Image (spheres, grey):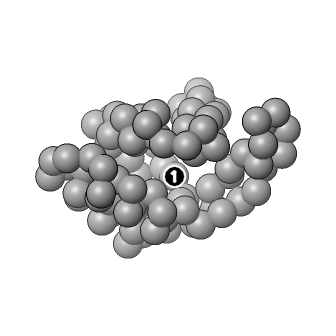
Amino acid sequence: MKVDFTKFPLFTGIDRQDMVIADIRKDIADGIYRNVPGLPAHVLAEKIYRNELVELADDEIHILDLYTSASVGQLADSWQDYKKNNLETGK
């Protein structure tokens, strides 16, 4: 799955009706770097931080699932929505 973390859609409220497009590279890379142990997570954090469009392997999607599930609701819900919409369409 390809993800452009420079143009990532984030829900703006609990009702999930509106979204903003944001560059979340630094925030998500810092979060993974600080909170997810292991070399694969470290490599993923660097990959996200240094690139606009990122091709994610299944193990990297799993790392993002772990990180976002322990994050604030806005990020967790936005990631799950993005993943659902893009895995189903094969993007």
Residue drawn at x 15%, y 47% is 38
* Residue 42 in view of the camera: yes
Q: Quadrant of the C terminus?
A: top right
**Picture quadrant of residue 72:** top right
Closer-to-camera residue (63/84): 63
Q: Secondary structure at mark 1?
A: strand
Closer-to-camera residue (79/34): 34
Q: Amino acid at mark 1?
A: Val
* Residue 61 in view of the camera: no
Residue that lies at the very extreme toward the right in this rendered image: 17
Number of numbered labels in the structure image: 1
Residue 86 position, x and y percent, is 59, 37
Mark 1 nearby-residue class (10 Å; few <14, some 14–19, many ≥20): some
Is 13 left, or right, of 77 in this rendering? right
Is 79 left, or right, of 26 in this rendering? right
Is 35 left, or right, of 68 in this rendering? left
Residue drawn at x 33%, y 40% is 63
Q: Is residue 64 above or below residue 47?
A: above
From the image, tell me which residue sits under label 1.
Answer: 3
Residue drawn at x 66%, y 63% is 22
